[in-house]
Image (cartoon, rainbow, N blue to C red):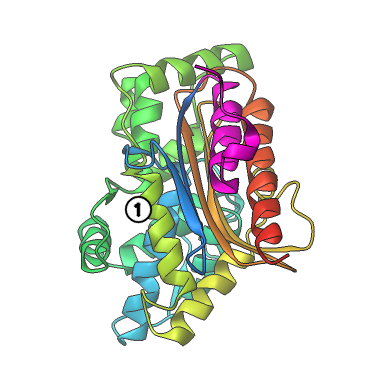
Amino acid sequence: MGAFSVSELSWLEVLENRLRQLAGSVRAEWAIYVHFTGGAGEIAIDADRMQDTMSLNKVPILVTLMRKIERGEVDPAERITLTEDHKRLGTGVLFLLDAGASLTLKDAAWLMTVVSDNTASDICLEAAGGVDSVNAEMRELGLHCIEVTGDALTWFRALAGSMDPELATVSPGELVRRGYPFNTPASFAAARERYHFGPANRPFSLASARSLGQLMLQIHEDRCAAPATCATIRGFLAGQQLQTMLPKYMWGVAAAHKTGNFPPFVSSDLGIFTPSAGRPVIISIMTQQHRGQRAMVEDTIARMGELIVHASECLSG
């Protein structure tokens, strides 16, 4: 039996085949969900597999927080005085500031979203009612494959404790003060790899690419909260400062998105992408269990984004 020619395939099938080829070029566990708005179709490649979200979990935290603000349960103008025990390792800037700095809860939401600040994330998670509250809000929205499993502190204690068991029990401020116990970059890299691929690894949170994509679709369609609240959420996501994945090769495209990383093992991106000429498209791409160069997997995600947005632009042609 001869191979199918490209002319016998729909544009959606051609795009899916190309995404599968790109994913196959990088050894990792991929999960891909693409939804073209306006009923134009969607692509799902292992989109229902639960994967480590890393900081993609900050989107359900943000949505939960904003829904509670909308209901009058939380005050975005509440002021927080930064303490040493607020501070978390990893991405962000708040852990670099002196204790005593003052910010509002809204400031924390901005930092959690636009620079993926882990200190701000735990502040927002607490204000949103904690892990159980976020998971309950996701169930209420019909999203049963989003599971926040703990705060950032829990994850960083587990990572640090895999290198030195004492670090799993010290105070949050002490953990940040000490940092990770490595002597060279190579030894630290090896410790991180053992953690990710070993039995001690715990997910930052778990979700499927489809469920996160469906959450983004609800944000886009003003269905997860009132229209004004959804517009505010989109504004937060549009401020995202990390542009090395999906938006990298997109020109003239408005991006409201969130990244999640534990490089080079996990690199993921999720968002609403609106070309200047074309329909908005929801893209949710997750990876885990990757060995190799961070730049390779991130650039592959960027190339996927370029192809998907180009297809969206062609739909309006």
Say which residue appears at 56% left-offset and 69% top-offset: 236
- Residues in magenta? 1-27
Residue type, label 1: Ser
Say which residue appears at 48% left-offset and 62% top-offset: 82
Observer-nearest of 195 and 169: 195
User: Which image quadrant: the C terminus?
Assistant: bottom right
Count of marks placed on residues? 1
Residue 294, picture quadrant: top right
Magenta highlight on residue 219 = no
Observer-nearest of 47 and 167: 47
**Which residue is label 1 attached to?**
211
Res. 223 in view? yes
Residue 57 place in picture, x, y as percent: 40, 51
Q: Is residue 120 above or below residue 64?
A: above
Residue 282 place in picture, x, y as percent: 52, 58
Say which residue appears at 37% left-offset and 40% top-offset: 204
Observer-nearest of 296 and 91: 296
Residue 299 place in picture, x, y as percent: 69, 34
